[in-house]
Amino acid sequence: MAESDRSEALTGKYFDAAIDLLRQVRDGEGDRITAAGRLIADAVAAGGRVFSFGAGHSSLPAQDTVYRAGGLAVMNLLSVPGVVGVDVRPATLGSALERVDGLAGAVLDTSPLEAGDVLVIISLSGRNALPVEMARNARALGIKVIGVTSVAYADATTSRHSSGSFLKDHCDLVLDSRIPVGDAELTLPGIDAPFAPASTVVTSAIMQALVATAAGTLAERGIDPPLLRSGNVDGGHDWNARVMSEYADRIFYRQ
């Protein structure tokens, strides 16, 4: 096979794999995603706050819902220094911090989260101490927890938390991303390791489906959902200024 033909074949295989995973999530997790979106709508309608958290690459779908066009203005990022993204140096430090016991409790104790709020915790494996403790401690504080994780990891790996449990064991609702263990969709003769992860594509889609469901649920209840517009369309800045002023007590990314 010519080099260009092989490249085109890999492109198609990757998109096919990602589309197949999205279909699996749509068909298998649709009802739970709808329920989770309604849980977010409940919090917004009751005057509560909504936060999302992820460590490492799992932080990307969490960040994707915060302060963005077409998103809910009241979505906030729960930031843990050193683990959000890969901008920390060395990048491996973020992975190490995910395994530190007690960090989640310190973060929650100094965060604005209160009983009745909603926290979406994203962790592909759900096995590290940070997401497990984040979920356990949050629920103990009366916070509703939505976990987005690959349930398959609980069957194929061991927990790194002292309890032996996974993120999925400490949530009010669990959304299974259906990502295979290892998060790599393609293999090729001559390449020793599997490659082409799809977790960010799938998990970002789950997060946007949550936001869409929450917005639609609020509208069904006669509540104008606090949505942001693009700042690159005429009138967008004025629209966003009005929404953020109205919901200023529930927006924390401007402080």
Image (cartoon, helix red, strand yellow):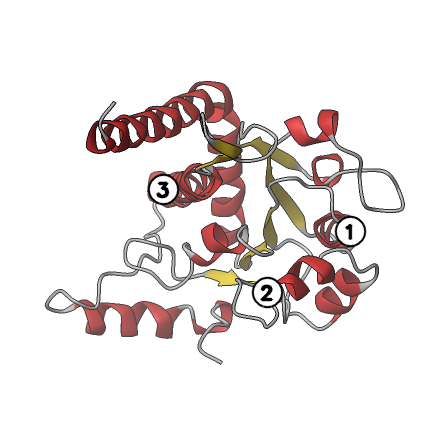
What amino acid type should be assigned to the residue bearing mark 2?
Answer: Ala
Q: Quadrant of the N terminus?
A: top left
Residue 57 position within the rendered picture, expressed as x and y whole percent measured from the top left: 53, 52
Q: Compute the Cα span from label 3 to label 1.
A: 30 Å
Residue furthest out toward the left: 234
Q: Mark 3 or mark 1: which is in front?
A: 1
Residue 154 position within the rendered picture, expressed as x and y whole percent measured from the top left: 73, 30
Residue 141, above or below 175: below
Q: Compute the Cα span from label 3 to label 2.
A: 33 Å
Does residue 115 appear left or right of residue 218 in this picture?
right
Disc 3 secondary structure class: helix
Q: Compute the Cα span from label 1 to label 2.
A: 18 Å
Q: Are marks 3 and 1 in contact (CB under 8 Å)?
A: no
In the image shown, does 218 or 235 lie closer to the viewer?
A: 235
Q: How many marks?
A: 3
What amino acid type should be assigned to the residue bearing mark 3?
Answer: Ala
Badge 3 crowding class, 10 Å Cα cut-off, few under 14, some 14 to 19, many 20 or more, is some
Q: Which residue is mark 3?
A: 212
Which quadrant of the structure image shows residue 145? Answer: top right
What amino acid type should be assigned to the residue bearing mark 1?
Answer: Ala
Residue 124 position within the rendered picture, expressed as x and y whole percent measured from the top left: 60, 41
In the image shown, does 128 or 173 lie closer to the viewer?
A: 128
Badge 1 crowding class, 10 Å Cα cut-off, few under 14, some 14 to 19, many 20 or more, is many
Disc 2 secondary structure class: loop
Residue furthest out toward the bottom: 255
Residue 17 position within the rendered picture, expressed as x and y whole percent measured from the top left: 39, 25
Q: Which residue is mark 2?
A: 91
Which residue is at a point 72% across and 60% down the rendered structure image?
Answer: 96
Residue 11, above or below 73: above
Of callouts 3 and 2, the N-terminal one: 2
Which quadrant of the structure image shows residue 155? Answer: top right
Disc 1 secondary structure class: helix
